[in-house]
Image (cartoon, grey):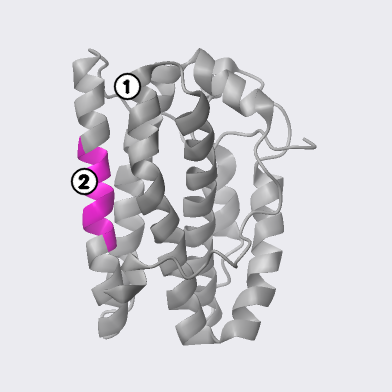
Amino acid sequence: MTALLENPTARVKWLAVPSSAAWLEAANARPDLLLIDHAHCERKAAGVALQLMFRYPSDAALAEALSPLAREELEHFELVLQVLERRGIALRPLAAPAYGASLAAAVRRQEPHRQLDALLVAGLIEARSHERMALLAAHAADAELLQLYGELLASEARHFGLYWVLAEERHGREATVARLEQLALVERNALGGELADPHGLRMHSVGVAGG
Ligand code: FE
């Protein structure tokens, strides 16, 4: 499990642009809404890891990396659930932002491209979560939230590191770097524009520097 323990991607630049001050402001204006969405994100992240294990059932090394990742995401899900419960906030379904669908649409259908893209899209989502959680760990609305996001940061960084390693091992460095560059632009475009409705605030709602 060395891949999960170290962070070999400190040298890899995932995100094409940073999040905007407007996103952070919207997030701090609706911490309850963000927490509910965060719970869903952690559960979805576990689902993504499991889905990949089901899609490539004979890749033992992939399962060896993704199974603990899925467990860790579920632990985070449980942690966020506890915070929701302490605050008397009911978990409820939320409409997903366009972000996930925009990224999913960029995944090519044919193998081996499909796998490379799926790993990189999963990594990009983790990288954006990490970047936004880092903002929250420094600027969240209250002490409990500052602590929650601070605690989650290190593992989120490991998560996108892991997806990088899985992609590079299976598809080579050159192809991985080239495709990441393209998908990072898709990711940036998926977060372009301004939030029309403040209730649409999500962990992955629009809001990046430069619009
Ligand atoms: Fe994660």
Q: Does the numbered disc 1 mark a residue whose Cβ is under 8 Å from ligand 1?
A: no
186 part of magenta stretch: no
Q: Is residue 136 left or right of residue 32?
A: right
Give the quarter of the image for residue 159.
Answer: bottom left
Location of residue 133 in the rendering, given as x and y in whole percent from the top left corner:
47, 38
**First along the sequence among labels 1 and 2:** 2
The residue carrying pointer 1 sits among few (fewer than 14), some (14 to 19) or many (20 or more) residues within 10 Å by Cα, namely few
Q: Nearer the viewer, mark 1 or mark 2?
A: 1
At 46% from the left and 60% from the top, the residue drawn is 160
Taken as a whole, is the magenta stretch helix, strand or loop?
A: helix
The segment highlighted magenta reads: 69-78
Q: Is residue 202 visible?
A: no
Name the residue carrying label 1: 144
Tell me the amino acid under the disc marked 2: Glu
Residue 65: image quadrant is bottom left
Q: Amino acid at mark 1?
A: Glu
Residue 139, position as x, y percentages in the image: 52, 24
Name the residue nearer the viewer: 162 or 196.
162
Q: Which residue is mark 2?
A: 75
> Which residue does the image show at 67% across and 43% down from the upper left?
18
Give the image location of residue 78, x and y in percent.
Answer: 20, 38
Work out whether 131 lies above or below 149: below
Specify the quadrant that holds the N terminus: bottom left
User: Does residue 97 sit above or below 163 in this rendering?
Assistant: above
